[in-house]
Amino acid sequence: MIVDRQGRRFRNLRVSLTAACNYACTYCVPDGKRLVAAQDELPAETLARGVAYLIDAAGIERVRITGGEPLVSPRLQSFLAAMAGLRLADLTLTTNGQLLARKLPLLQAAGIRRLNVSLDTLDPLAFRRIARGGDLATVLDGMEQASAQGMAIKVNMVPMRGQNLDQVLPLLEYCLERGFELRFIELMRMGHLAGAGQAFTQQFVGLDEILGLIGRHYAFRRVEAPADATALRYEVPGTGRFGVIANESEPFCRACSRLRLSSTGWLHGCLSSGSRHFVGDLLQQPRHLALPALQRILVKALADKQELAFAGGVTVMKVIGG
């Protein structure tokens, strides 16, 4: 097991199945162009072998499949099949929900029982303006079908001033009524929003303001969350829960246990670091040769983590997943 001086180790792995996405969200890509799959994306079997190796080399316990948008990837079915039988406490998937209803039988067959759905508004016009793609009604229908089939759903919303701040309460009410857990995610200094530029500062909405808006209509209290959780968790008594990923207001770097594997074979130990480590070649090697080299790389990736707080990064979030 690889542990740093703060006691952190890698427990949670995000696997970006593809960089391609059928959306072009304003906080992710600046020019409105949808991201496409990289020419050198690894085969599904190789990525799944990477997961298996990282379970052994780092002690990975939980995996979340991300993108881009994983449901657009032709590798999805093969990857899920290759993941069968791995020693994991949890396998989840993050999606924008546009293809959810269509892919639901495949996800169920693979044993996925929890989903994170990115949804920033219930207003159809605002939805098209922010996502620059897709259809709101299709997403909502997919979520309803998944819920009816027994899947637990978390909804991820990025509140932005001038974009969707008026949707904080409607979206919370929508989720509470359906038993979904809404996660408000503070805007991140990623990609074209890196640094303290005008675009970031004008749109950023912090923890105190989010809780203030909610407090006008709901009584709530903070409840305990796992030690390495990214979200602060709150309970609306007798109704449900919501969370806030307050990467700016209340950073969680001291306890971060996340590692990211890109679709092209790069390991990212920290979203706020410009460092990345290529392991695509190692994933082609037999286990007994790959693991020692992989562990040496993991020591470097763990050292990339910030000591205290997220400082921003130039990497486009959609390339390596949330």
Image: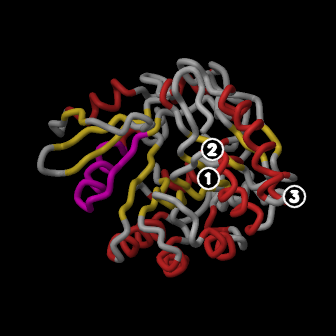
Residue 212 pos. (x, y %) = 27, 28
Residue at 35% x, 49% y is 182
Q: State the residue position of label 2.
A: 58
In which quadrant of the rendered view does residue 311 lie? Answer: top right
How many residues crowd around disc 2 within 10 Å: few (fewer than 14), some, or many (20 or more)?
many
Image position of 216 (left or right of 208): left
Q: Which residues are magenta?
A: 167-184
What mark, if any, has residue 94 been given in the picture? none
Q: Nearer the viewer, residue 303 or 263?
A: 303
How many residues crowd around disc 1 within 10 Å: few (fewer than 14), some, or many (20 or more)?
many
Residue type indicated by callout 1 = Ile
How many residues crowd around disc 3 within 10 Å: few (fewer than 14), some, or many (20 or more)?
few
Image position of 169 (left or right of 105): left
Q: State the residue position of label 1.
A: 55
In which quadrant of the rendered view does residue 148 lie? Answer: bottom left
Residue at 62% x, 68% y is 83
Q: Are marks 2 and 1 in contact (CB under 8 Å)?
A: yes
Foreground mark, 1 or 3, reads 1
Looking at the image, is 108 positioned above or below residue 266? below
Give the spatial CA distance, label 2 vs label 3: 25 Å
Give the spatial CA distance, label 2 vs label 1: 6 Å
Image position of 72 (left or right of 105): right
Q: State the residue position of label 3.
A: 40
Quadrant of the image containing the N terminus: top right
Residue type indicated by callout 2 = Ala
Residue 190 in view: yes
Magenta span contains residue 128: no
Residue at 63% x, 57% y is 23
Foreground mark, 2 or 3, reads 2
Residue 111 pos. (x, y %) = 48, 73
Residue type indicated by callout 3 = Asp
Q: Secondary structure beneath disc 1?
A: helix
